[in-house]
Amino acid sequence: MTQKVQGVVALGKGAPVRVETIVLPDPGPGEAVVKVQACGVCHTDLHYKQGGIGDGFPFLLGHEASGVVEQTGPGVTDVAAGDFVILNWRAVCGRCRSCLRGRPWYCFDTCNARQKMTLEDGRELSPALGIGAFAEKTLVAAGQCTKVDPTVSPTVAGLLGCGVMAGIGAAVNTGGAGRGDSVAVIGCGGVGDAAVLGARLAGAARIIAVDIDDRKLRTARAMGATHTVNSREDDPVKAIRHLTGGHGADIVIDAVGRPETYEQAFRARDLAGTVVLVGVPTPDMKLELPLLDVFGRGGALKSSWYGDCLPSRDFPMLIDLHQQGRIDLAAFVTETIGLGDIERAFARMHEGDVLRSVVVL
């Protein structure tokens, strides 16, 4: 049996996205069909459309989503029809060498649905990050479904599926921010602001937000930044050092992912400090640093995969903190839109006047 739903598809590199009819098979072993309730518009979706993440067109876009499990396939025990879930794109396998060493957040064999969703003409779709949630329903591996408090707003919950979790996790999990630390965040879009929020949640004493847009810096202040630096006007390395007694920050998070911002992060950290790269670079980007400086400054240079999160641990915890009023996830939602508004949302993203546009179904 199959069912047909509407979804947003990128048919070719750079072409405008279109709402198309999607054909979903019944879930097979280890799979689930999820009725999508909300899905955030992430830069990664735009990268897919632009051909920056492979050439497996057509892509079914969307991955930052929440919804309700509609059906499960044979062998699924962790979720059942009716469960409210956040979709995650790193469903841990529990069997690889990283999982067996007790580091499942680095799982090297994450799971996706084995079956393919298709267009009506039979062309197989490549779901963005193995999810494809700009659709009324989607087919995923059951391990990609993380149960959370069903009373939370779906519009808010879905944000943990990618950007907000990536930012909070970059500060808390990868960077190891703690009480009294100084944290600088370069790039104050959705992920960067989430890193600011994560640093505040961890008890950082000084949180420095860096961006070229004063609008974004004002938002970062609202998220918990104690200081801001407009890097169009001031050298960010000098400014961060000035704000940290001349030493540099304990943790510097690059939420942009460009060689120049990474070098700024490298130069702006304290001796033995930590650099965290969470912004995603493009395949053509190269980095050149004097190896002696890498050695001489000590510390750690880290990449943050999905905020080094463990969805089963982190999603419910962060939803609980939101429900208790201790963090405001709703502050990341700039607007709610429909499936037909994705192109406009991409344009607004480029203009820099949204944190998140969220598709509500």
Image (spheres, rainbow, N blue to C red):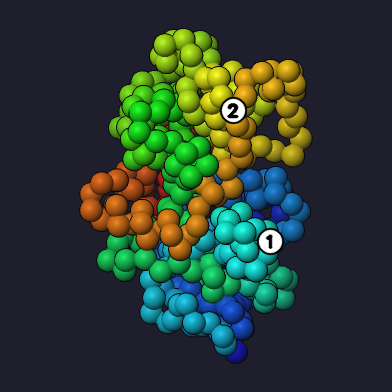
**Direction left: furthest residue:** 325
Please, is residue 58 above or below residue 343 in the view?
below
Point 61% across, 40% down: residue: 303
Circle 1 Cα neighbour tier, 10 Å, few/some/many (<14 / 14–19 / ≥20): some
Q: How far apart are marks 2 and 1 (CA)?
A: 26 Å
Point 36% across, 39% down: residue: 202
Callout count: 2
Residue 339 in sight here: no
User: Which badge, 2 or 1, comes first in the chain's sequence?
Assistant: 1
Q: Position of residue 141 (x, y in %)?
A: 58, 72
Displayed quadrant of residue 317: bottom left
Point 29% across, 52% down: residue: 322
Mark 2: secondary structure: loop
Residue 97 is marked as: 1
In the image: residue 155, left or right of residue 275: left
Residue 84 is marked as: none
Determine which residue is flagged by label 2: 299
Circle 2 Cα neighbour tier, 10 Å, few/some/many (<14 / 14–19 / ≥20): some
Badge 2 amino acid? Gly
